[in-house]
Image: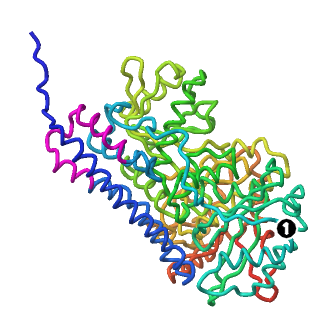
Amino acid sequence: MTHAEPQTVVSAQTPVTMARAIIGGFDDYRGKFEQISAGARGRFERADWRGMQQACTERVDLYDLAVSLTTAQVRTLVGEAIKAAPLWEAAKGEYSRMVYHRTDGELAETFFNSIYCRTHRHKDIDDNKVFVRSALPADWEPPETGICRRYALNGSLPRLIAQILDDYAFSIPFENKRRDVRNLVRYIKDHPVDGILMGRGAHLEIVKSVFYRNKGAYVVGRAISRDGGRCVPFVMPILNNGAGGVFVDTLILDPDDVSVIFSFTRSYFMVEAPIPFEYVRFLQSLLPHKKAYEMYTSLGFYKHGKTVFYRDFLAHMEQSDDLFVIAPGVKGMVMTVFTLPSLEVVFKIIKDRFHPAKEITRETVKEKYRLVKRHDKAGRMADTQEFSHFVFERRRFSAELLDELLRVAGQSVRVEGDKVIVKHLWSERRMIPLNIYIDNASEHELRSVISEYGNAIRQLAAANIFPGDMLFKNFGVTRHGRVVFYDYDEICYLSECNFRRIPPPRYPEDELSAEPWYSIAPNDVFPEEFSIFLTGRRRGEVSRIFRELHSEIFDAGYWQGLQQAINHGEVVDVFPYRRKKRFDRGALAQPGEE
């Protein structure tokens, strides 16, 4: 005879109390999130770049802190009943009614999911107890106030641009407003974009909120043709001159260049977005190839971005039938990586045992990924989403892949019936591994990608990140041809390294010795040895190009100079567009970073 599990008695009022506690925790989180985001304007006007970086880190940390506090409150309120499925089912129903008409209801649903996952260790997830799929109406419309200002493209173009600059003015003046208007008018006339920006009857729609990131303030909008059939995205970056004034740095009209500004390799924007869904919908109209989860993440709602990614993943699995396979490229010493050919994503799992050359632990690897999440990515590190107890259908795994995963990551991967369950993994945008790209590149492509590789190392260093292992296999190439770092197990802060020149040999025999003739501490780095990273069958070509374009990377003095700047509190300019796109400021012109 079997005995049923004792049932936890849940009073009728308990689900309401629980739902109110969770929505209260969410409201507190949203208030603090918006407060930090709203403060970006003041930090930009004061040129408080260190404060901007600290605020970004604080805002990333805010979510987990809010979940921890709210989970503790819920435990106190409901006690032992917190594990009861009927309670969560009832609480979800109450919560759905509370968030149904909110302008941030989708974020509130994700917060509810987070509380459940924290209490259930990411197990027993189904749509009865959490919002696997959103319960919000698909035809929800925002308030009539809208998120954009509208400008008709009629009459004087200089007057219109001057009006826009006035509407997006700051508490500090423009350095030279007349010059900025002139630069914008000239650029628009030289880049008419199929006539939309010069055509009568067309109009502009510009987001009321300014987007802030690092040292830049970005005015984001679109030009729409008279018949509404054509739409051109644009971004107008505004910078602080550090002397109490601002200036328009350029105008970005090319959709690919706009896409780079919203790249998965960039830090999250600070923007006041009271209706997140509407902001995402607007941004997707500018960049239709971007997924909604990428747009939510770009706005700083990275947890909800993770929710939308998972929903997209489930939908894709229902609509496809290809098999997961081992990802192309050299197998990692720390991670095993697999992908679905029809999905532009890779999944990364920590191996059970590392190569002897890797003197790190599993927890150290996790900490490195957390560091990247909280740090300025400088456009050169791929953002990731972290998952626990991720469930796949077994039938979608090739036999070769499943054997590989169980062999090298058996502590994290298990098979239960028709499911493959991964205890812990990261998802990341799939790119072409740099070593594979180099092998197949034309001469022009090779020069361009080696230049990008060097720029990636430089810009990571400017953001106080030293990648450690700079082998080509640890970098990827995006569809825009940008080189991005994605292997984080050896990264560290640049300021923690001790860059040294190799001491001259004491005797002729020193150079023939298998062992170095000088002492080496754990944090010592010798840039003269970086040529060992320039490997592959095209090593000669690669080395020649790299030394021509980036020879200072082999010089310890170059790295020591960067360290001094960082230690003195300098925040180096790294903007998401190339130097040649920047407007002429006359005698005030300054070089860009890319």
* In the depicted structure, whether residue 528 falls above or below residue 361: below
Task: Give the percent coordinates (x, y) of residue 18.
Answer: 24, 46
The rendered magenta stretch, by its main secondary structure, is classed as helix
Instruction: State left or right for residue 418 relative to residue 222.
Output: left
Task: Give the percent coordinates (x, y) of residue 291.
Answer: 61, 44
Place residue 144 in its image quadrant.
bottom right
Residue at label 1?
154
Place residue 354 in its image quadrant.
top left
Task: Give the percent coordinates (x, y) of residue 54.
Answer: 45, 71
Picture residue at 46% right of the left edge, 47% below the top: 106
Picture residue at 57% right of the left edge, 50% below the top: 486
In the image, residue 96 lies in the stretch drawn in magenta: yes
Instruction: State left or right for residue 297 relative to residue 167.
Output: left
In the image, residue 420 lies in the stretch drawn in magenta: no
What is the span of residues highlighted in magenta in the rendered image? 70-98
* In the depicted structure, whether residue 81 falls above or below residue 190: above
* In the depicted structure, whether residue 389 falls above or below residue 593: above
Task: Give the percent coordinates (x, y) of residue 502.
Answer: 58, 70
Amino acid type of the residue that numbered disc 1 sits on in the rendered structure: Asn
